[in-house]
Image (cartoon, rainbow, N blue to C red):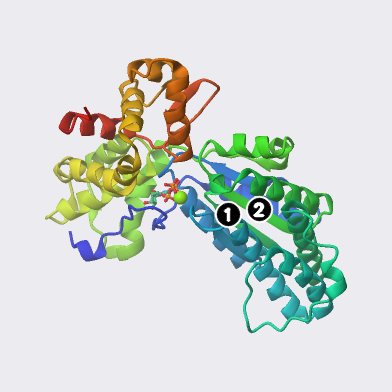
Amino acid sequence: MDAATNPYTPGAGTQPRALSGRERELDGFRVLRARLTHGLPERGIVLCGLRGMGKTVLLREMARDARDEGWRVSFVEMRRGTDLRDALTAAVLEQLAGLSIRERALGAFSRTMGLVRALRATIAPEIQIDVDATDLLTVGRSLEADLGELLARLGALARDQGIGVAFVIDELQELDAEGLAALCAAMHRVGQEELPIALAAAGLPSLPGLLAEAKSYAERLFAYPQVGLLPDDAARRAIVEPPRKVLGDDAPAIDDDAVERMIAFAGGYPMLLQAIGKHAWNRATGNAIGLADVVAGEQDAFDDLSRELFLARWQRATPRERDYLLAVAGAGGSCSSAEAARTANFGPTTAASVQRNTLIAKGLLWAPERGRVAFTMPLFERFVLARHEHEPAH
Ligand SMILES: Nc1ncnc2c1ncn2[C@@H]1O[C@H](COP(=O)(O)OP(=O)(O)OP(=O)(O)O)[C@@H](O)[C@H]1O
Ligand SMILES: [Mg+2]
C-alpha cells in the first residue's frame, strides 16, 4: 500500500486516527466537568499506566473535549530538565491573564500579580500589570500556599464568568514531592470552595504512591483509572477504523485472518497495534492487507517499538544497572527485589538497592508493591534478553 496514506500512528504521543476503548475515561472527565459546572464536588482524574499504553493521546482527547465544551484548557507536560514548578505556575498564570483580560478585572488581576512576583514566573510581556505593593507582603510563604491562592483566585474569576478551567498534566510523576504536595493542596482547596477547576493528569503506575506520600489525602482527592491493554474489540477497531477514516470508501480491505493475527500479535498493547498496522500496510502489495503481510511485518513492528521506547532508555543505564535489568528480564519483567539482587550477583540486597532506586528514578522500573520491581514498559524483557544475547555485558 502507499506509505503516503498509511493511516497508522506508532510513536510517543502520536494521536491515533481511531482512539478506541477509552470511552469510559473520556466519559469520566465529561461527568467531572459537568459536576463542577453545577457547583458539585468531584474528584480529579489521574490516569496511570505503563509506557506506550496511550495516556498522552487520551489526555489530549480529554483536553479537546473540554475545549469543545467551551472550557479553557492548559496542557502541561512535566518534562525532566525543565523547572516543573514554573511550568505549573506559568499555566495557572496564563489562564489568570486570559480571564482577567476577558473581564478587564484588572483590580483582581493586579492583586494576583503579587503572587506572580513571588513565584517568579514568566508572563506575556504585552500584558500591562499594575502591581499593588501591599499585596506582595502577603505572598511568597510557600509554593503550597501560593499555588492554592492562585488557583482559588482563578477559580473565583472563572465562576463569576460562568466558565470552567481545566489543567491537563502529563508525566506528573516527574514533579518533585513539594510540587506534588502543592498541587494536591491547591486542588483540595478549590474543591472545598467548589470552584470550576478540573484536573486530568497522567503518569506511570508509581504516581498514586508518590501522590499519597506527598499528601495522605491524595487517595481520596483523585480517581486513578488504569490505562491498560485494549480488549480485543477495541483493538479490532484500532486496526480496522484508521484506513476508513483516512481514505473513506477508497480504503483497502483487511482480510479477517490478518486482523486477527494483528490483534494476537499486539496483545492489546496500543503502541504495538499501531506499529504492526503500519508495517502490514507498507508490506501489502495487492488491493487488500493479507495474513502474509502481517507476518512479514512483525519483526519490523517490534524493531519500531525498540527504537521508540526501549533503546534510549537502555543506553542511559550503567553496566551495573543493565545487570539488574537483565535479572528482572530473566524473571519475565517482574520479580522480588531480593530475587533480582541474587540473580544479578549483587551480594547483599542493600548494594542492589542503589541500582534499583536509580532505575526507578530513571523511569525504567517501578514497585508494584513493597519488595517487588517491574518494568514500566511492556515487552521490555524481550528487548533486554535479545540485547544480551547479541552483546553480553561482561
Ligand atoms: N486507544 C488507542 N487506540 C489506538 N491507538 C492508541 C490508543 N492509545 C494509544 N494509541 C497509540 O499508542 C501509542 C502510544 O500512545 P501514548 O504516547 O499516548 O502512550 P503513553 O501511555 O503516553 O506512553 P508514555 O508513558 O511513553 O508517554 C501511539 O502510537 C498511539 O497512537
Ligand atoms: Mg505519554
**Residue at horizontal 36%, vertical 61%?**
245
Name the amino acid type tagged 2: Leu
* Ligand 2 closer than 8 Å to label 1 CB: no
Which residue in the structure is indicated by mark 1?
A: 169
Q: Estimate the x, y position of residue 268 in percent, counting from the top left.
A: 38, 38
Q: Which mark is residue 199?
A: 2
Q: Estimate the x, y position of residue 59 in percent, counting from the top left.
A: 53, 54
Residue 294 figure quarter: top left
Q: CA distance from mark 1 to mark 2?
A: 8 Å
| Disc 2 residue crowd, few under 14, some 14–19, many 20+, Cα 10 Å | many
Residue 310 against residue 115 in the figure, above or below: above
Contact between labelled residues 2 and 1, with CB atoms less than 8 Å apart: yes
Question: Considering the numbered disc 2 on the image, is that residue within a helix, a strand or a loop?
Answer: strand
Q: Which mark is residue 20?
A: none
Residue 228 against residue 64 in the figure, above or below: above
Name the side, left or right, on which 41 lies relative to 68: right
Q: Quadrant of the C terminus?
A: top left
From the image, state whether disc 1 or disc 2 is nearer to you.
1
**Residue at horizontal 30%, vertical 43%?**
315
Residue 8 against residue 246 in the figure, above or below: above
